[in-house]
Amino acid sequence: MKAIKLFERASRTYSDSSSFSKLLVVFTVSGGGLLAYADANSTSPIAPPEIKKKRVVVLGTGWAGTSFLKQLDNPSYDVQVISPRNYFAFTPLLPSVTVGTVEPRSIVEPIRNIVKKKNVDVHYWEAECFKIDSQSKKVHCRSNQNIDGKGKEEFVVDYDYLVIAMGARPNTFNTPGVVEHCNFLKEVEDAQKIRRSVIDAFEKASLPSLSDEERQKMLHFVVVGGGPTGVEFAAELHDFVKEDLVKLYPAAGKYVKITLLEAADHILTMFDKRITEFAEDKFKRDGIDVKLGSMVIKVSDKEISTKARVNGQVATMPYGMVVWSTGIGTDPVVKDFMKQVGQETRRVLATDEWLRVEGTDSIYALGDSGKLTVKELQEVVDDICERYPQVDLYLKTKKLRNIADLLKDDSKSSVEISIEELKAALKEVDAQVKNLPATAQVAAQQGAYLAKCFNRMEEAEKNPEGPLRFRGEGRHRFRPFRYKHFGQFAPLGGEQTAAQLPGDWVSIGHSTQWLWYSVYASKLVSWRTRSLVVTDWVKRFIFGRDSSSI
Amino acid sequence: MKAIKLFERASRTYSDSSSFSKLLVVFTVSGGGLLAYADANSTSPIAPPEIKKKRVVVLGTGWAGTSFLKQLDNPSYDVQVISPRNYFAFTPLLPSVTVGTVEPRSIVEPIRNIVKKKNVDVHYWEAECFKIDSQSKKVHCRSNQNIDGKGKEEFVVDYDYLVIAMGARPNTFNTPGVVEHCNFLKEVEDAQKIRRSVIDAFEKASLPSLSDEERQKMLHFVVVGGGPTGVEFAAELHDFVKEDLVKLYPAAGKYVKITLLEAADHILTMFDKRITEFAEDKFKRDGIDVKLGSMVIKVSDKEISTKARVNGQVATMPYGMVVWSTGIGTDPVVKDFMKQVGQETRRVLATDEWLRVEGTDSIYALGDSGKLTVKELQEVVDDICERYPQVDLYLKTKKLRNIADLLKDDSKSSVEISIEELKAALKEVDAQVKNLPATAQVAAQQGAYLAKCFNRMEEAEKNPEGPLRFRGEGRHRFRPFRYKHFGQFAPLGGEQTAAQLPGDWVSIGHSTQWLWYSVYASKLVSWRTRSLVVTDWVKRFIFGRDSSSI
């Protein structure tokens, strides 16, 4: 019953989502604000297609890049894809791969498979982009394999349009020792490495002639970061140990300890409070030691040091393996590119709401590598007030019920609002918008949105479908990108999952686990991966997880 | 129809095999010959079990070791297993793993899983034995992982009985450059490495800005050794390229070349001539370049040099990847052990026909690490004639129809045979016996045989069931080991397999491929691996093989 209600609720929410929720109003606002900027420095951002095919270069085969490639169906482009990984990986299942609930190959699909049946010319090069040259519209690439007598092959690719979808790096916050001693959980290889490390730890701890302290240390698994990935990994590891490993390593069982370190006051802070509480309680029952308010300050080859946020107390504990999952940082190549386009002072690459990188006319950024953001709204408002004194007047005289009304240009009677108040409000809005979560959902939607824009480029030139231009005549060619949030899952182990769906709807328990299975199975990129992952799940139910050290 | 007949034939042959075929007569002969030796130097080889459990140490978790562990069910032993691999791998499917027809995890079973439900105490240590000390009955082991501050953990294990089942190393015949530049195909890791190398080669060759020569070189795959493994790998690689890769890498297809180098005059020389011919023809049709009579003399990082056996001509060709599969050599640890037991002049470890290492009283050798062999029969005969002059007389006066009759001690009228002729005949027999193939079948049967001996050790002490002792009173405790050959497969690609069953029965074609599927599926170690491998086969039929570079 519960499950059915959940589905009804979910589908109702999905169908409602086109009628703009509160969140979407925010987008309209920031969108409007940004038009001013986008127009200010564009000469002719996207020229009409010529007979010669436009060269589109896509950097990356993650969620954003792959989603872009899948949706692109206008044969007037010549597409080149550059990525060190010749496959797309369904990253939400990476925590499952770390313990073998799902096999690595079940969640990947070769990018050549994805693009081979398209009517668009797509070439893939297995290489890493090490420099973007936005002046001469070239990207410099390097193969990740040695070629005899030549070292790593380097080559240059020209573009007319560049789509940056490289994804981000794990953020270490420059904590000493993290890069050297911690495992990350961003790539399939990371998950495979963790899997081997867990088995290795059990094998090592089973050797004769070791002290109890040594065994305890080897089987102390530390997870840094209480976000969805860290929590899911801790839960999966706990299940693997309890359901499979203690049966095979009965002597080692009593030494196992899992610690979850979180710098904030709670885990899963992006979720509803009920989910956070449930998760913390469940982990307590499971014996996972959740240390809240603990900032990691140093990792050595044997110990991890934390500082308590409350009293600054420093504690040090020996560990066997650390998984670092605290968020993402910007790729050095993107950092370098940001300098070229005058964004050196920004933390992340800024785009307008058509996903075009600010300061460029033909470069787009998707997914983790470019967060949707806007030029500081405050500056925009200042700019507006300076150039259009009537707006200043308007702001001072008109009564505004809602910020959006300003940009919609049809005000309604409302409370009065001062310019300063407006600025403060806009700033807050801006900060929120910038924090669009760096999730697969966002990246996939961005990729699909951009592909649709590319597909209709010619047509939209003639019949623009976007909002009215804030400055200048006519309309924008496209509607701005809008993120539709379809909810988020937090698997907590023991066949229990928490889910937060739009409309603050929260569901926790076994039925949600089944919803999780259904949603993830349906979202997988191909029928091949879908059937493989489902087979893996069935396998796990019947035979448990494999513990071979390969 | 053909398939049904094949099954009938096969099962008839299997049921016949207990009534000793020609081959088995040979064993009887060599067996008898050897008794003399075995008795000569044994004081009390296997003491009756005391209340304290006898410590059995098993080195290796391959076919022989695992088969021994599976069959051992006498709880009066305390078993310790030492192997760097915590799993058993179904090695006949390794060539399939190289191209992803079967996944690596589908063919492995954790050794802890295999032994956990036994009534015998079995402990497993993930470590490598680096020294056998037969004087003080100890093995020295080293963990294959670093333990902080200690390096690799070393420990010593005492034994009452030692079972050497470590398997052999690939034999490079000291050819320069082989270890540095060639891939082997003995372990699961080898197969995984080959799989990555093949995909890498295709990705490299697809990069822009390479010359045709470079692409040709990268996609030139060389297989050294025309035995069953080399041939099967070449066939699997060919199928992978034709069925999957050319579709995804259309530009690279024309550069691919597979070369098979064989020093002898034909490939698959251990099979019937009809199979050899069929295989050579099929490879010719498939475009696999089989170079017969080509001995590899050197491998550099770019080129492989061969010498023609006929005219000594040296040829050098560039390659992208080499897989070396020419047979096996002895492990250095076993070599060192051979010195301790006075076998320094032998090529391989020699055992008597109860699988006990010659020169020891409590060490057994199984599988590739100890070939079943006998002390040179010629020496035995000399020895017999010296000590028992009546035998000499007997040989000279009696007419022997069959060499076996001598040892059975009931001669029948036959042609006369001189001592010299007998020596020559015995020598030939010895040479044949020594060449028992180093296959999974032999190893598995040896492991099972030895486990049965261990299971009935006490009982057999009271009621010996072996043949009469050649010297001394009474009977041997056990019947000697006898290898039953159930035939051998040679998969040739394109869903065609050749099979040679006992009685010189040969079957080639698609129906044999299905027999191959059935036999291999049934021989897999557990229901888990069985269902996984079958799932992999189904997967491959539906979706093809995966080409992701992970």
Image (cartoon, coloured by chain):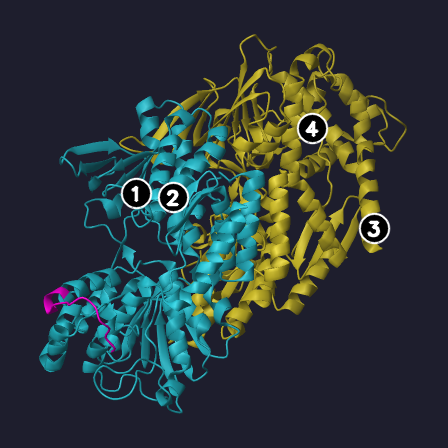
Chain colours: A yellow, B cyan
Quarter of the image with the N terminus of chain A is bottom right
Q: Is residue A36 above or below residue B336?
A: above
**In this rendering, do the residues under marks 2 and 1 share a single chain?**
yes
- Which chain hosts label 4? A
Q: Which mark is residue A4?
A: 3
Camera-near label (3 vs 4) is 3
The lab-note entry on whether marks 3 and 4 share a chain reads yes
Q: Find residue B233 and name its label.
A: 2
Between B444 and A51, the residue placed more toward the observer is B444
| Disc 2: CA contacts within 10 A as few (<14), some (14-19) or many (>=20) | many
State whether residue B107 appears in this view: no
How many numbered circles does the render carry? Answer: 4
Q: Is residue B414 in view?
A: yes
Label 4: which secondary element = loop
- Single out the mark in the foreground, 1 or 4: 1
Q: Chain of mark 3?
A: A
* Mark 1 chain: B
Question: Range of the magenta residues?
Answer: B410-421
